[in-house]
Amino acid sequence: MGFKVLEILVTPNPNAKKFILDAAVSSQPLSFFSAAAAKDHAVASKLFAIPGVTNLLLLGDFVTVSKEAEARWETIAGQVVKILKSS
């Protein structure tokens, strides 16, 4: 099935971006603050495999991805889109 990313929005936090999707990823808020916490969620566990990802929020038609300050969005954003498309 997969998700198409319609838009990537900046947030007040420079280390977080909001990925707007073409379909609902979750009907209720799901927050993950570690890979261990996300191990039972297919999409979240794949996103945590991206180096630099620190936490996730999934709700409705968006995913907010937070990263380490040193990590680069140029690297992470493309991987997020690829994972969401194949999920």
Image (cartoon, rainbow, N blue to C red):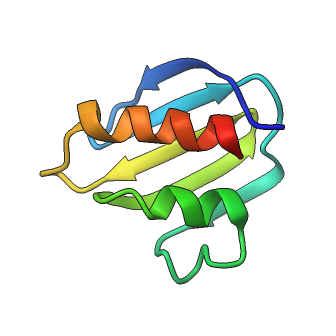
Between 86 and 34, the residue placed more toward the observer is 86
- Along the viewing direction, whichever of 67 and 50 lies nearer the viewer: 50
For residue 54, above or below residue 61: below
Q: Is residue 75 or residue 58 the one in the foreground?
A: 75
Residue 61 position (above or below residue 57):
above
Residue 14 visible in the picture? no
Whether residue 3 sits left or right of residue 27 in the image: it is left
Residue 50, horizontal then vertical, whole percent: 39, 56
Residue 28 visible (yes or no): yes
Farthest-out residue, top = 6
Q: Determine the residue positioned at 60% across, 73% down.
A: 38
Q: Give residue 77's quadrant in the image.
A: top left
Q: Residue 44, located in which quarter of the rendered image? A: bottom right
Q: Quadrant of the N terminus?
A: top right
Q: Residue furthest left?
A: 70
Q: Position of residue 65 (x, y in %)?
A: 46, 46
Viewer-closest of 21 and 84: 84
Identify the residue at horizontal 58%, vertical 80% (top origin).
Answer: 37
Query: Compared with residue 86, is residue 70 higher up or lower down, i.e. above or below?
Result: below
Residue 47: horizontal and vertical position, in percent? 51, 56
* Left or right: 56 in relation to 2: left
Q: Residue at the location (48% across, 41% down)?
A: 80
The structure residue drawn at horizontal position 66% and vertical position 50%, both measured from the top left corner, is 58
